[in-house]
Image (spheres, helix red, strand yellow):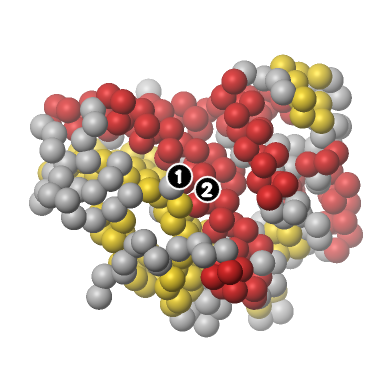
Amino acid sequence: MNPEPWLQRSATGWRGGFEAMASPCELLLEGVDEATARAQLRRAQAEALRIEQRFSRYRDDSVVARLHAGRNTWQWVDEETALLLDFAAQCHALSGGLFDITSGVLRHAWRFDGGTQVPSAAAVAALRPRVGWHRLRWQRPRLWLPEGMELDFGGIGKEYAVDRTLALLQAAVPAPTLVNFGGDLACSGPRADGSAWQVGIEQPTGTAGEPVAAAVLQLRQGALATSGDARRFVWHEGRRLGHVLDPRSGWPVEGAPRSVTVAAPRCVEAGLLSTLALLRGPGAAAWLREAAVPHALIGADGSLHKHFDTLAPTT
């Protein structure tokens, strides 16, 4: 039995939440009564947990576990899984191979727990033959996963859950809504009074305690996603190595920003762009500017760089 989600009245409506996908999940609602807010919150929780159950790599009853158990055979997948695999293929192509959902196997070597334990070069090299989208065969709706390879939807699953949950809630009750799953979020549009939602961008301090906002942005439409090393990192020879790995080398990207927040029409798109920026390492800011992507970037020195054409930061 899942814990009952919490709900409380806010200054302008309702705020509620629950835990899913190893993240705090929050829902903001306006223009509805308490019974409707509670029903929407339960819908959001049920959908988040459904997606977690289906695509988590940590569960024995997930689609991912079934696909791993059926390696070296053709396996038919359902429509939802096919859509995620299609998107993964697009991400791999658009990124030139940098965004690769088969790279999750590298977690067998890396432990981004804030400590100092770093795998040997030999341990990482041993896993590299098990990484590479080009090694599997995806012929919709059939998948062939070679022996030893794994799928990891972690890079797109939470963002997909945000988009899917918001669509589900809007279909039930088209009220001003913001869905926030662990800092990846999307809104239905402006708030009930026509103003923007206030969204804080966390300063990645790397220390325990209450989050510190590096900036507050105004979101009127669309989605935001953040990638960074605030909670998942390792120290090595005095350097902080974030959890974003280059699938070509199996090692963390050097010189990457501390965090990148990107705006896009959908959360899955924002998540892809924020991760691609981190994978550019020290070239992240230039790549985002050249691509004209609205973003807020926190550099390795903690400095904030904002470039939002459609989302105006508050002062």
- Horizontal and vertical percent position of residue 53: 52, 28
Q: Secondary structure at mark 1?
A: loop
Residue 15 makes an appearance in the image: yes
| 108 in relation to 136, above or below | below
Total number of numbered discs in the rendering: 2
298 horizontally vs 93: left or right: left
Query: What residue is shown at x 41% (from left), y 28% (from top)?
Result: 47
- Horizontal and vertical percent position of residue 309: 39, 66
Q: Amino acid at mark 1?
A: Arg
Q: Secondary structure at mark 2?
A: helix
Query: What residue is shown at x 84% (from left), y 49% (from top)?
Result: 127
The residue identified by callout 2 is 269
Task: For the N terminus, give its image quadrant.
Answer: top left
Query: What residue is shown at x 26% (from left), y 59% (from top)?
Result: 198
- Horizontal and vertical percent position of residue 261: 46, 62
Q: Evaluate if marks 2 and 1 touch, with contact meaning CB atoms under 8 Å apart.
A: yes
| 145 in relation to 107, above or below | above
277 horizontally vs 254: left or right: left
| Crowd around label 2: few <14 · some 14–19 · many ≥20 (10 Å) | many
The residue identified by callout 1 is 266
Q: Amino acid at mark 2?
A: Glu
- Horizontal and vertical percent position of residue 21: 48, 40
Residue 241 makes an appearance in the image: no
Quadrant for residue 280, please give it. bottom right
| 167 in relation to 186, above or below | above
